[in-house]
Image (cartoon, rainbow, N blue to C red):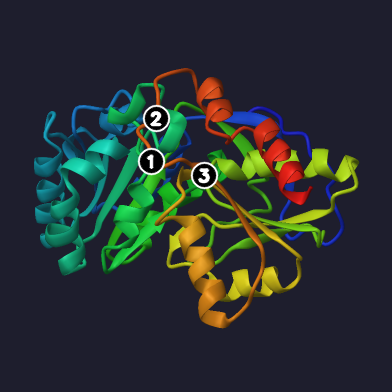
């Protein structure tokens, strides 16, 4: 990793946040760490090894690497079979293919039997510029509805590497959104630890309480700084853990703020916003809520920056929508 420069945020920070450095292939780094101490770990891919950062694993452990070709259902069933003979199977493909083409296989061949299959799914949400066929905009909703499934949405290189290293020890079937290639560093790897089932609070501003997951957290952090300069004080509840979800932590956080803004690189139904609103409703805690998410439509092709701006997920659009909502 190149040098990381720290920056100071508001009082009562529970997590250190750093400048926008990047790490190449953090998934590969974490997987290689896990493989060194777990001989039972194997890696499978559906002909996307080059695009899911597993070349290092393939070169070092050729007998523990399997490319099943463009057949996602075969990928998942092969992984389930390897789990039944004592292996822990890491699988890589794109999120659209993992969820839309192999959904039943992940549910029945894997989660139904608590198999040790860990699906790392690339191009989550608007990360892909190839339109609705390649944008996994609804994957969190699909995967969290499956019993026995752990669902994770990392923010940055720090969380991606940590999840890859720890997934081998998470019981049962895991679905994790995969961040690949050059991944920004948002959280200080020396201070931040991903906790399954737990969220992380940043700041103590009470005007707005942001709730975010995945890559949206970096944009929310930047939006908070800009809003603070305009006199709008905010705090942030970040969670990489969609299932299990830290409902108790969210409720404590929501009780400390006047309004909630929920941000996710996912459609507005079935994902983080739905989880948060369900938790508030069940507890009888009422807060005005603004949802910033991908609209209910097949999204366009285009550059990442273009798509984020068009669909309201860029930092500038977050600021604009929050200000408009407050007015």
Q: For the residue labelled by badge 2, is the local secondary structure a helix, a strand or a loop? A: loop
- Is residue 73 in view? yes
First in residue order: circle 1 vs circle 3: 1
**Crowding at label 2, few (<14), some or many (≥20) Cα neighbours within 10 Å?**
many
Report the residue marked by disc 2. Answer: 299
Residue at x 72% of width, y 36% of height: 320
Residue at x 40% of width, y 38% of height: 124
Residue at x 19% of width, y 54% of height: 106
Report the residue marked by disc 1. Answer: 137
Look at the numbered discs 1 and 2 and tell me whether their residues touch, using CB distance below 8 Å.
yes
Q: For the residue labelled by badge 1, is the local secondary structure a helix, a strand or a loop? A: loop
Q: Position of residue 122 (x, y in %)?
A: 36, 35
Would residue 205 be found to the left or right of residue 218 on screen?
A: right
Report the residue marked by disc 3. Answer: 293
Q: CA distance from mark 2 to mark 3?
A: 12 Å
Q: CA distance from mark 1 to mark 2?
A: 9 Å
């Amino acid at each position: 990793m190149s040098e990381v420069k720290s920056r100071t945020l508001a009082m009562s920070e529970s997590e250190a946040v750093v400048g926008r450095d990047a790490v190449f292939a953090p998934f590969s780094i974490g997987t290689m760490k896990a493989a060194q101490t777990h001989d039972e770990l194997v890696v499978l891919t559906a002909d996307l090894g080059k695009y899911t950062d597993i070349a290092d694993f393939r070169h070092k452990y050729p007998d523990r690497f399997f490319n099943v070709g463009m057949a996602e259902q075969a990928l998942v069933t092969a992984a389930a079979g390897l789990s039944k003979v004592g292996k822990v199977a890491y699988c890589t493909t794109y999120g659209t293919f993992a969820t839309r083409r192999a959904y039943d296989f992940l549910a029945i061949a894997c989660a139904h039997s608590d198999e040790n299959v860990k699906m790392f799914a690339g191009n989550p949400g608007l990360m892909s510029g190839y339109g609705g066929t390649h944008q996994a905009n609804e994957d969190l909703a699909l995967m969290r509805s499956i019993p026995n499934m752990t669902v994770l949405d990392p923010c940055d290189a720090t969380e991606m590497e940590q999840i890859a290293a720890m997934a081998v020890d998470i019981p049962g079937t895991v679905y994790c959104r995969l961040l690949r290639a050059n991944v920004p560093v948002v959280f200080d790897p020396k201070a931040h630890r991903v906790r399954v089932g737990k969220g992380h609070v940043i700041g103590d501003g009470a005007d707005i309480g942001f709730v975010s997951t995945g890559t949206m957290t970096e944009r929310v952090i930047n939006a908070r700084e800009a809003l603070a300069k305009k006199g709008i004080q905010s705090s942030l509840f970040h969670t990489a853990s969609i299932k299990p979800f830290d409902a108790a932590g969210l409720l404590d956080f929501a009780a400390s703020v006047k309004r909630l803004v929920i941000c996710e690189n996912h459609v507005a139904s079935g994902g983080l916003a739905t989880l948060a609103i369900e938790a508030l409703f069940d507890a009888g805690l009422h807060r005005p809520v603004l949802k910033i998410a991908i609209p209910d439509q097949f999204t366009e092709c285009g550059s990442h920056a273009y798509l984020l701006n068009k669909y309201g997920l860029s930092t500038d659009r977050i600021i604009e929508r929050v200000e408009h909502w407050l007015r």
